[in-house]
Amino acid sequence: MNSYYAINLLIYAGVDIIACLALNLQFGVAGIVNFSFIVFQAVGAYTAAVLSMPPDTAPDYSFQIYVGGLQLPFPIPWIGGAIAGGLLAVPVGFVVLRKLRSDYQAIALLVLSVIANTVITNARPFLNGAAGLALVPAPLADLFDPATYGYFYVGLTAICTALVALVAFRIVNSPYGRTLRAMREHEVAATAIGKNPVALKMTIFIVGGVIAGLSGGILTGYITFWAPSVWLYPETIILFAAVIVGGRGNNLGAVLGALLVPVGFEEVTRFIPSSIGPPGLIPALQWVAIGLLIIGFLWFRPEGVRPEPRRVFEGAPD
Amino acid sequence: MSLFVAAFGFGLVSMSVIAIAAVGFTMQFGITNMINLAYGEVMISSAYVAYYLNKAGISIWIGMVVGALFGAAFSFLLNRIVYAPFQRKGTSYLGMVIVSLAISLMMANLLLPIVGYYSVSYQEGTGGLIRLGAIILTTNQILIIGIAVVVMLLIHGLLKYTRLGKAMRATSANPTLARNCGIPTQRVVDAVWLITGALCGLAGVVAALNSDSFAIANGAAFLITILAAAVLGGAGQPYGAMIGAVLIGLITELSAAAWSPEYKEVVAFGVLVLVMVLRPQGLLAKRGAMAAAG
Amino acid sequence: MLVATDIHRHFEGMHAVDGVSIEVAPGKITGLIGPNGAGKSTFMAVIAGTLPTSSGTIVFDGKDITRLPAYRRARLGLVRTFQLPSEFARLTVLENLLVAAQHNRGDSLFGALMGKRYWIEDERKLVQQARALLKRFGMSAKESDYAGTMSGGQKRLIEIMRALMLQPRLLLLDEPMSGVHPKIVQEIQYYLQDLRHEGLTILMVEHELHMVERLCDTVVVMAQGKVIGSGTMSSLRKQQEIVDAYLVG
């Protein structure tokens, strides 16, 4: 295995773990089926990109058109991406999370995901449309030898992953996390014991948005590119598959799911020669397999590989 | 001005297509409690069934019937094999939405290697133009409007005057009570999947016939327009879906004339968001049908 | 304690609650009885804020709460239970109690992010409080089991304990004995009497008239969305029209 491949794998793993931890907070813990999760990642990616890129009048960049182009130094673009993800969660949550029954929430979010992609694809002057943004500057690239930069980026990703994991574990293991789980189990009863479900959902939706935005910033800084084709709505379904397989409500499960589904699965299938069958057959079958994985797990093992832990308190009778 | 009159003409056709699809979709939901996100993919599959028949030299009007039959059979089996077992297992509404989304993803990608990425279109004469003032429609489009009117009348008759229709409405209102009253809900549910599946298949062929060409990717776009119409009218309400279809058909075509056809679904989405904020129960639905529980 | 005046609740053109006025005296158990469809449960839901009021006013402890959302009413000490089991199934029995506590520094996003040291003191106190309740209700042994695996009667007890964790001033019980094994019915009855002696005010919907007779200080009779009488059970038995409307038929 060469080091380029290993670096690539580690960075993708970090980004997917971050995303799955965030989705687990929303979906696994709080019960919000955020089918537009990938939109929040995309907002973070676009924001980080236009904050770090030079204006679109700059010589090498004039083949694309976009807003912003502020050329801000690292880590401002990543922070900006995270904030943008959180900010987007406010209006979306306001429309979706207040009055609608949970299954309608899911559908509204799914539709939002499809529409957001359509709009960005067609509105070219905003973020360069379907072609997307290229030549996104890699953070602090000029401080490193290109040969060692990959290791640096792995380190950066690892720090962010650790930070997000800390946040996720603190939330899940806190009384606040318990309140979120109670709301997931029975919203009306949670209201009857003084919990405000709208406020609870909004906070965790924003937290998830911030983390998703950060994951987008990390990803775009590495692949130095971002376009509508990388955030189509099925990308969210992969993350759902990961959380369902790993174990809803369990942080370690989310990490495991991220390693098994988006990372492991994609890596394994890369080795299938693409010359088999008509063009597009292998990727299409990958999607079919993702669908089967979701349905199979929901049928045979809905709690996932690592189920949500039952909490036993100190001093409990045996 | 005449641009908008022409757009009104297209609106009539659009609303016909949407009405057929949305009534099927909303009945599935209202009676079986299933938000079937694979609906758009079943539509597209049916459109392709008709396409292959058409390619083999069979008239598209026969293909339409076969497409409807395919939609009915496929939807029936989809429910029997996947949805109903999950529902019996006590899967939550939310779980069912995830299941149907997974099905939708699988269908689109199973279809892809078979039919390919490229857009196709039916080999069928448009049948010449018919002018009504500034409104110019093809004979096919007039026929589509006619089909929609007939289908809506049939649905009305079914719901209003047949035992099956009454049983459907009773099951929709309260499945437990309906079962206790001796209505065999299993048979009703089967009938619903057959009927709504036929509407879905028919809508797929009609929608494909109405557009210059179609491709796999159209499934999602279909679904959004249908959702907008169904939600606007009040989820689960067949008559609401008809009204929703009329409004969405008009609004999208007029906006396409005024602005850009690329944003048709975006406009439909805008309507969807407005309804969700202002009147989540839809235009016709009783309060509580769609609002948060409790 | 609670004064509800001229409460109406219209629903799809039906008058589920049609001008009900009641007053709940502090430290007493008030029973709400009536035939099926009389609007008792709807009325309870309106009082608790689960359903909005169409018209009328609700005053709790001298404060107009008519427009307050349900969760705010609960925080004021007006806590309800439900007719159907409504435990948090995949929380343990102990967690079902803990989650209801009002004052826990860790029960906010900020508190959670501050880490365990920030809230562990509060949590410890609440665990003690919850265990005391579990002991009193004879469920100590079940604390680490998922609430969803409990029997119907145990779920009732969990719900009552959960409500008590909020230190309510008025407890609204919607048919606390329905679907409960007769042996536990006795237990619940005993617990309720006990709570009353401690000064807790209770308003309860109940079908079983013997139970109402034994437990309730005052009884309000509802039929077709209206109050048709109130008083002690024995005084009600003397009123012919009430007997005709409900007590016999």
Image (tube, grey):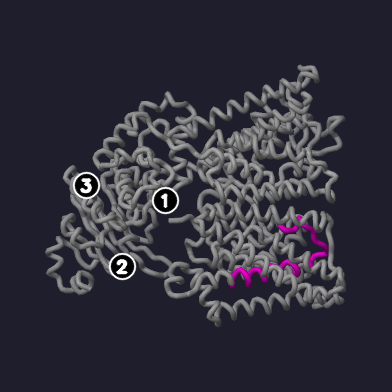
Identified at 50% across, 57% down, the residue is B291
Instruction: Determine which residue is flagged by label 2.
Output: C36
Magenta range:
B191-219
* Residue B212 counted in the magenta span: yes
Q: Which mark is residue C191?
A: 3
Where residue C87 sits: x, y (%)? Answer: 38, 48
For label 3, the SS is: helix
Q: Position of residue C82 (x, y in %)?
A: 34, 54
Give the amino acid type for the residue marked by disc 2 in the picture: Asn
Residue at 63 percent of width and 36 percent of height: A258
Amino acid identity at mark 3: Tyr
Task: Tell me the SS state at disc 1.
Answer: helix
Q: Which chain is disc 1 placed on?
A: A
Q: Which marked residue is nearer to the observer: mark 1 or mark 3?
A: 3
Give the answer, above or below, for where C223 lies relative to B156.
Answer: above
Residue B267, numbered label: none
Q: Tell me where residue B182 appears, x and y as whole percent.
A: 45, 75
What's the CA distance linking mark 3 and mark 2?
26 Å
Rendered position, C49 above or below A68: below
Q: Nearer the viewer, residue A74 or B20?
A: B20
Q: Which residue is mark 1?
A: A188
Residue C26 visible (yes or no): no
Measure the C-alpha gap from mark 1 to mark 2: 23 Å
Q: Is residue B228 above or below residue A156?
A: below
Helix, strand or loop at mark 2: loop
Q: Chain of mark 3?
A: C
